[in-house]
């Protein structure tokens, strides 16, 4: 292990008349009092504000080479798994490096998650393992999975508020549920028992409480599971024949999303638009990311949301992190 320590913008919204937050974007108002004095009422901030970007291209500690995934902890610090440099990185929200480490057996870091105590979970599809590190980067445990090592596979990891670890094997369409002591409690196929029948899971994220959310089980929806059982399905839009459509229209959702206490943040498959929905499936808005990410075709970027309402978008192509603030 090689530890390392280290000590305004454009807002664009598509179809603003359809935004659930449109009432927030009001202009400043001037009010004249009886005495003739003029008082200025400050404008409400835009619901989605670009704060800045950070990231230095490179293969050394504190740099980003070919980053694959992003996560945050309870303090808002940012964690990135970088298979290009094989570093696991930790940064302050503004990009100051805090920690970087490598581990000899972890050569293909892929998915990353952080639990409430600050432990770091990283998957490696080539070893068919999940590595668990203490907050200082010391290896705590390697959990071998009941799947074949495969560099082409995707192994996602999510940790709920109770410390249960859920590992998604995309090729096998299976979820492995582990207790906080890393005892394998059960293996299950999330497609069984859902409202729309079996599907192919593509991405897993933990939500409020002990819920986990899985994408890919049905078209334009996320499936919620509690204790390994299907709980509900969140519909995230469908084709609409209305002119103009009354809700944002999605023909296909991406496989990158983040969950806060109240909202779902979902990137389009082309990586140009961010959609926001409530956990009950009500559309709240859509925001253009092309001013920062560019307008050329790309895959959906990994995203994460902090407790301080900062949304982080990982530009894997340019090895940068874009930071936005959510005023809702």
Image (spheres, helix red, strand yellow):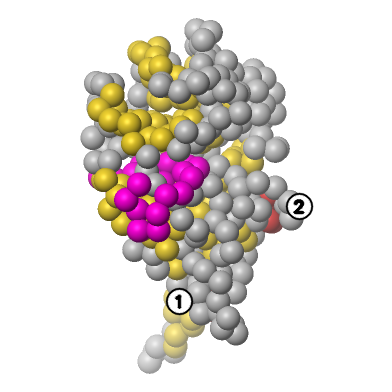
Residue 163: in sight, yes or no? yes
Q: Quadrant of residue 268?
A: bottom right
Q: Quadrant of the C terminus?
A: bottom left
Q: Residue at x 69, y 23 (%)?
A: 58
Residue span colored magenta: 192-214
Q: Is residue 130 left or right of residue 275?
A: left
Q: Which residue is mark 1?
A: 23
Q: Give the class, few, some or many, for how many residues have Cα within 10 Å of label 1's Cα (few <14, many ≥20).
A: few
Describe residue 59's horizontal placement relative to residue 241 as left or right: right
In magenta stretch: residue 22: no
Give the residue drawn at x 39%, y 64%.
Answer: 281
Residue drawn at (38%, 17%) of the image: 143
Considering the numbered disc 2 on the image, is that residue within a helix, a strand or a loop? loop
- What x and y, as percent, mark residue 89? 52, 24
Judge whether 182 appears above or below 204 on screen: above
Residue 162 position in % (x across, y down): 23, 35
Q: Is residue 211 magenta?
A: yes
Q: Give 303 or 310, whichever is nearer the viewer.
A: 303
73 versus 261 height, above or below: above
Asked which quadrant contains residue 146, the reply is: top left
* Residue 260 in sight: no
Is residue 317 toward the left or the right of residue 102 in the image? Answer: right
Instruction: Verify CB contact (< 8 Å) between mark 2 and mark 1.
Output: no
Give the foreground label among 2 and 1: 2
**Whole-percent x, y for residue 253 in the image:** 55, 56
Dot placed on the residue nearer the N-terminal end, 2 or 1 = 1
């Amino acid at each position: 292990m090689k530890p390392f320590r280290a000590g305004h913008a454009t807002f664009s919204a598509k179809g603003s008349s359809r935004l659930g937050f449109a009432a927030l974007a009001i202009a400043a108002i001037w009010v004249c009092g009886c005495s003739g004095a003029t008082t200025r009422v400050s404008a409400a901030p835009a619901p989605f504000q670009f704060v800045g970007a950070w990231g230095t291209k490179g293969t050394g500690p504190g740099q980003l080479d070919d980053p694959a995934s992003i996560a945050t902890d309870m303090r808002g610090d940012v964690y990135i798994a970088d298979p290009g440099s094989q570093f696991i990185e930790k940064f302050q929200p503004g990009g100051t490096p805090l920690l970087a480490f490598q581990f000899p057996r972890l050569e293909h870091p892929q998915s990353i998650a952080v639990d409430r105590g600050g432990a770091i979970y990283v998957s490696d599809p080539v070893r068919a393992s999940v590595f668990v590190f203490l907050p200082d980067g010391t290896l705590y445990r390697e959990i071998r999975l009941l799947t074949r090592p495969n560099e082409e596979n995707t192994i996602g990891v999510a940790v709920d508020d109770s410390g249960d670890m859920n590992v998604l094997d995309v090729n096998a369409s299976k979820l492995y549920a582990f207790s906080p002591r890393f005892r394998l409690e059960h293996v299950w196929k999330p497609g069984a028992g859902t409202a729309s029948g079996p599907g192919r899971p593509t991405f897993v994220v933990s939500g409020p409480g002990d819920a986990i959310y899985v994408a890919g089980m049905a078209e334009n929806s996320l499936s919620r599971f509690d204790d390994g059982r299907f709980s509900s399905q969140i519909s995230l839009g469908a084709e609409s024949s209305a002119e103009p459509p009354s809700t944002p229209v999605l023909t296909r959702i991406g496989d990158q999303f983040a969950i806060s206490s109240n909202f779902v943040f979902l990137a389009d498959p082309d990586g140009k638009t961010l959609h926001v929905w409530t956990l009950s499936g009500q559309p709240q808005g859509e925001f253009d990311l092309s001013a920062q990410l560019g307008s050329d075709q790309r895959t959906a970027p990994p995203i994460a949301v902090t407790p301080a309402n900062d949304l982080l978008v990982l530009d894997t192509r340019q090895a940068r992190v874009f930071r936005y603030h959510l005023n809702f």
